[in-house]
Image (cartoon, rainbow, N blue to C red):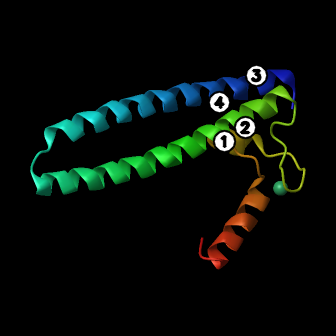
């Protein structure tokens, strides 16, 4: 991939990170607000299930964040846009939709098939 394109994708990745960090920050303050306002046990239970939903969401966000950081690292060392599995180039169309992708669409589909077979 030429440096201009690499820079372009790096820009997208950095923007995605700042967006994610922004939402993560908001979620934390919303959570702590909720905790103070529920004294009733029923509300309390509901609030706790909301919190577990939020925590799951944050877990996903954290994983995405790690993927994006890894992708930026790849931009730095010049391996960005190359499939980790087969070494082919990942199509730019795919990277525009999923700039953090580390697998080409072929290998990704293969991986999803295996995950499904194993019930993951
Ligand atoms: Zn591949």
Gap in angstroms between the C-alphas marked 4 and 1: 10 Å
Mark 1, residue position = 67
On screen, residue 31 above or below 115: above
User: For the residue labelled by badge 2, is the local secondary structure a helix, a strand or a loop?
Assistant: helix
Residue 108 on image: x %, y %: 73, 59
Quarter residue 68 falls in: top right
Residue 60 on image: x %, y %: 52, 48
Gap in angstroms between the C-alphas marked 2 and 4: 10 Å
Density class for disc 2 (Cα within 10 Å; few <14, some 14-19, many ≥20) is: some
Mark 3, residue position = 7
Image quadrant holding the C terminus, namely bottom right
Nearer-N-terminus badge (3/4): 3
**Nearer the camera: disc 3 or disc 1:** 1
Judge from the rendering whether residue 97 lies leftward or rightward of residue 19; answer left or right. Answer: right
User: For the residue labelled by badge 4, is the local secondary structure a helix, a strand or a loop?
Assistant: helix
Mark 4, residue position = 13
**Disc 2, disc 3: CB below 8 Å?**
no
Nearer-N-terminus badge (3/1): 3
Q: Quadrant of ligand 1?
A: bottom right
Q: Nearer the viewer, residue 56 or 110?
A: 56
**Nearer the camera: disc 4 or disc 1:** 1
Residue 94 on image: x %, y %: 70, 45
On screen, residue 93 above or below 114: above
Mark 2, residue position = 70
Density class for disc 1 (Cα within 10 Å; few <14, some 14-19, many ≥20) is: some
User: For the residue labelled by badge 3, is the local secondary structure a helix, a strand or a loop?
Assistant: helix
């Amino acid at each position: 991939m030429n440096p201009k394109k690499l820079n372009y994708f790096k820009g997208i990745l950095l923007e995605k990170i700042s967006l994610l960090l922004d939402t993560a920050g908001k979620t934390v303050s919303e959570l702590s607000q909720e905790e103070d306002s529920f004294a009733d046990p029923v509300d309390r239970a509901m609030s706790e299930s909301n919190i577990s939903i939020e925590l799951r969401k944050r877990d996903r966000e954290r994983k995405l964040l790690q993927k994006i950081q890894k992708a930026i690292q790849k931009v730095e060392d010049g391996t960005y846009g190359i499939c980790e599995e087969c070494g082919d180039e990942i199509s730019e169309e795919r990277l525009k939709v999923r700039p953090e992708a580390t697998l080409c669409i072929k290998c990704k589909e293969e991986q999803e098939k295996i995950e499904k077979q194993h019930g993951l």
